[in-house]
Amino acid sequence: MAMPLTGLLESDANAPQERANILIVDDLPEKLLVFETILADLGQNLVIVRSGSEALREVLRREFAVILMDVNMPGIDGLETARLIRGYRRSAHTPIIFVTAYADELQTSQGYSLGAVDYILSPVIPDVLRSKVRVFVDLYNMQQRLRQQALERIAIARAEAAQRAAEEGTRRSIFLAQAGRELADSLDADVGMRRLLALLVPRFAPRALLWLRDTGRGHERVLRCEAPALEGEAPLYFEGRDDVLSEVLYGSTRDTLEALTGSGARPDEESPSRLTLPRRDTGHGVVLPLITGERVLGGLLLCDPHRPPDWPTLEELANRAAIALENARLYGALQAEIVERRQAEANLLEASRRKDEFLAMLSHELRNPLAPIRNAVEVMRQVGAGADPRLTQAVSVTDRQVKHLTRLVDELLDVARISQGKIVLKTETVDLRDLVTQGLEPVQPLMAAQQQTLMVKMPDGPVWIRGDGARLIQVVTNLLHNAAKYTGPQGRIELSLEINEQGIDLRVRDNGRGIEPELLPHVFDLFEQGPRGLDRNQGGLGVGLTLVQRLVQLHQGTVAARSEGPAQGSEFHVHLPPQLVEEDHAAVPLPVAGTTASSGWAEGHSAQPARDCRVLVVDDNRDAADSMAVFLELAGFETGVELDGPDAIRRCTAERPRVVLLDIGLPGLDGYEVARRIRSLPEMNDALLIALTGYGQLDDRRRAHEAGFDVHLVKPADPDAVVELIEEWRQRDQRDQREGLPDGGVAAVSS
């Protein structure tokens, strides 16, 4: 290890820069003490080590003016240490003085071959040792001073060059800044091309030519700018990228080439980058590419017979010109794209408007045929019930299919309304257990027909939440209907409802056909269904689960599907957030599905006793009007039928019916106007007006109320519900008349 001389040597960080390092290598302490004493007067940094390996470490750490080394040392001797020292770049020329007790010719020759500068026999003479070491220290200090002077001269030269480069760079920057402003000032390509040529002539060349490929318009464009014409003929050489030279000089037409280089120009047969021009002397030409990315926009040709090209400035100017021209091209393309986009947006708005109109018309046109079918089914059920089991079975089949078709139409329209933001939740405090119970009822006939087992697990106490009860019932019904469809006969379906700190969890599990892995991420997409056989026994439009997802999202909840694969069953998990849960409330009871008078009417075998109430049915669909009238007659009402608005108004004036079932979509005079005119009749002011229509959106309900309707029913309306509604109004009207009230009107109702 290093042994610095106490009191004379300091750390490298604090040592004066003019002090030289002297390395002393010997394995004997007494000799080291002698060397230290003799050389202390030199005032240099003495580094003392006791072995060759320590000497090598020190050589790697610092630079030495001279190395004083003993030849005979244990381990690595002095000669081997010298050879290794000469292998380092820093110490390849460091003077080495060997100290030895004897030196034969062979050892001396070997030492000098390894770079030794002298041999000193021990015991050493102090003055001799001190003088020899001082010589090498002085030589080292002189070399350091010369090196420092050289570095200073280099630094000065570099500073001067940097100053010249800075001045040139400043001039170039000022010019390029001005050029950039002029090029960027206009987004017109022709204006930019003319400004570019004006910057080049005569500053860089007496003649400048700009060739621009305009692929958008399908032809080349050439602009020229030159000083006074030069006469005579001489070869003109061009410099630049080979691909650009080929593209600019030979990739263009003969007319373009002559426009670029002047009339009479012709390619040189020997050199591909040489043209013969009408010139007096041999000049120098420069071709600069205008490139954006990998695309060549065109080229700049400079013809200058005297000055060498300023490549850095020209290349930067070409780059900025290419950017400016590309910006002009992109601006033009952007303007065209904006026009196209605005046209596309207008087309989309028009398509959306037409879609809304189509959906509204679809609602009307699909529901209109369902209304007479459902009415006819109810008439057949009352008239022919018990007459023939086959007729009873046929009526039941027809009734189930009408309900199924009605449900599909409602689902499709609900999805469309949610997509358009036309569904607003009617939130109230409800018991989720009751909603689940009501959601089970529509699916029970399908499960019973397939002999499926339904297991329901719900909390013992009520689960109060703030939500739209009707929409949450739809969620439960659609999930159970989906499970029943895709679970085979005698399958098992489980429904569980849980409430915890994270919210409410509703799960529907089945052991049916499962969901394929590739279908699972898309199971909630509109019109998405799994593969079906030719029998299409699952049916449906693929909108039920889409409706579930969107209704749950309207309640700030989530729904997820899980399945292990085909034949492994599936699970649907609905999670409602805890903010919907209510602890203290005043619950609003919901009507329980299936509690209308429909069951009572369905079991009747003959017409009911006559009721003191005249009903007028107005519908341009004769089947719908007649079937509803027949059903109302069986219910004991006196009925009449009209097929248009004017006849309905005349009949109301003449006969004063107490109830009018009025279709809105009438030809000519629509139902809204008919209702307003009926309400204007003094004798019809207290009558019950029921809108019976295929239009069921919120705006349709609002317009119906404003026109004077008391009730808005969407086709196909349940005939039993219509009978129950009329009977309730009739009884209230009779009660009010007995009590002397002005009329027995009902509040506006939508169904």
Image: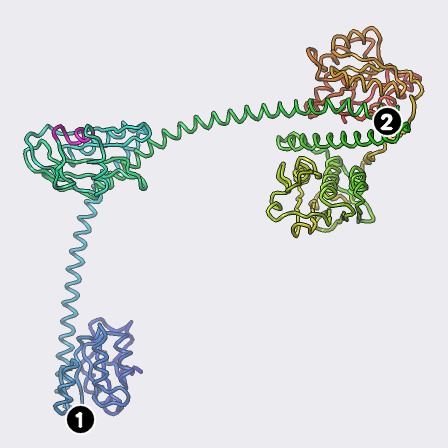
Q: Residue at x 77, y 48 (%)?
A: 491
- Direction from residue 320 to residue 123 in the image, left or right: left
Mark 2 — residue?
A: 381
- At label 2, counting other C-alpha atoms closer than 10 Å, the crowd grade (few under 14, some 14-19, many 20 or more) is many
Residue at disc 1, secondary structure: loop
Locate residue 471: give its quadrant: top right
In the picture, the quarter occupied by the C terminus is top right
| Numbered circle sitting on residue 238 | none
- Direction from residue 105 to residue 610 in the image, left or right: right
**Disc with the residue nearer the chain's start (1 vs 2):** 1
Task: Please state the horizontal and vertical placement of residue 28, each as a whole percent of the image.
Answer: 26, 91
Residue at disc 2, secondary structure: helix
Locate residue 90: give its quadrant: bottom left
Mark 1 — residue?
A: 101
For badge 1, the amino acid type reads: Ala
Q: 547 and 373: which one is in front?
A: 373
In the picture, the quarter occupied by the N terminus is bottom left
Magenta-highlighted residues:
256-264
For badge 2, the amino acid type reads: Arg
Q: Residue at x 75, y 14 (%)?
A: 675
- At label 1, counting other C-alpha atoms closer than 10 Å, the crowd grade (few under 14, some 14-19, many 20 or more) is few
Q: Residue at x 61, y 25 (%)?
A: 356
Task: Please state the horizontal and vertical placement of residue 380, each as a whole percent of the image.
Answer: 85, 24
Q: 695 and 144: which one is in front?
A: 695
Q: Is residue 117 above or below residue 143?
A: below
Task: Please state the horizontal and vertical placement of residue 448, each as a whole percent of the image.
Answer: 81, 42
Question: Is 214 one of the magenta-colored residues?
Answer: no
Helix, strand or loop for the magenta stretch, by majority: helix
Q: 274 and 269: which one is in front?
A: 269
Task: Please state the horizontal and vertical placement of residue 629, each as a whole percent of the image.
Answer: 83, 17
Q: Is residue 131 above or below residue 454?
A: below
- Direction from residue 324 to residue 618 in the image, left or right: right
